[in-house]
Amino acid sequence: MKKSYNLIPLVLLVYMIVMSVIGWKQFADKPLEFGAIIAAEIGIIVLLRFVLRKRYKFREEMKRQKNDPSA
């Protein structure tokens, strides 16, 4: 699957949005804490996407080198 490193972060982002909508009432009196939690989750999801992309590119490079040993 081409660019499969986007799927997991996308699913986690949708899950985070659903959970934040459901849990908004618990943080109604603490909006700054709620915003900080959401920002931290988004940061972790973005970081995960970059790590997965780097891993995907590294894996493709290793496959390319394995198929072409002269390079």
Image (cartoon, grey):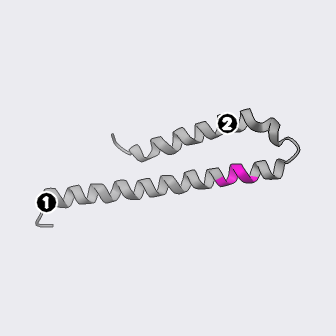
Q: Quadrant of residue 40?
A: bottom right
Residue 57 on image: x %, y %: 34, 57
Please identify the quadrant where the C terminus is shown: bottom left
Residue 59 on image: x %, y %: 30, 56
Residue at x-position 34% and y-position 43% = 2
- Label 2, residues with CA under 10 Å away: few <14, some 14-19, many ≥20: few
Front position in the image: 34 or 4: 34
Residue at x-position 26% and y-position 59% = 61
Magenta stretch, overall SS: helix
Residue 11 on image: x %, y %: 53, 38
The residue identified by callout 1 is 68
State the extent of the magenta-drawn residues as a range.
36-40
What is the three-letter code of the residue carrying label 2? Met
Please identify the quadrant where the N terminus is shown: top left
- Label 1, residues with CA under 10 Å away: few <14, some 14-19, many ≥20: few
Kindly give the residue lying farthest to the left in the view shown.
70
Label of residue 50 in the image: none
| Cα gap from disc 2 to disc 1, whole angstroms | 47 Å
Say if 18 sits above or below 52 in the image.
above
Residue 38 drawn in magenta: yes
The residue identified by callout 2 is 19
Say if 70 sits above or below 67 in the image.
below
Residue at x-position 82% and y-position 43% = 27
- Is 27 positioned to the left or the right of 4 in the image? right
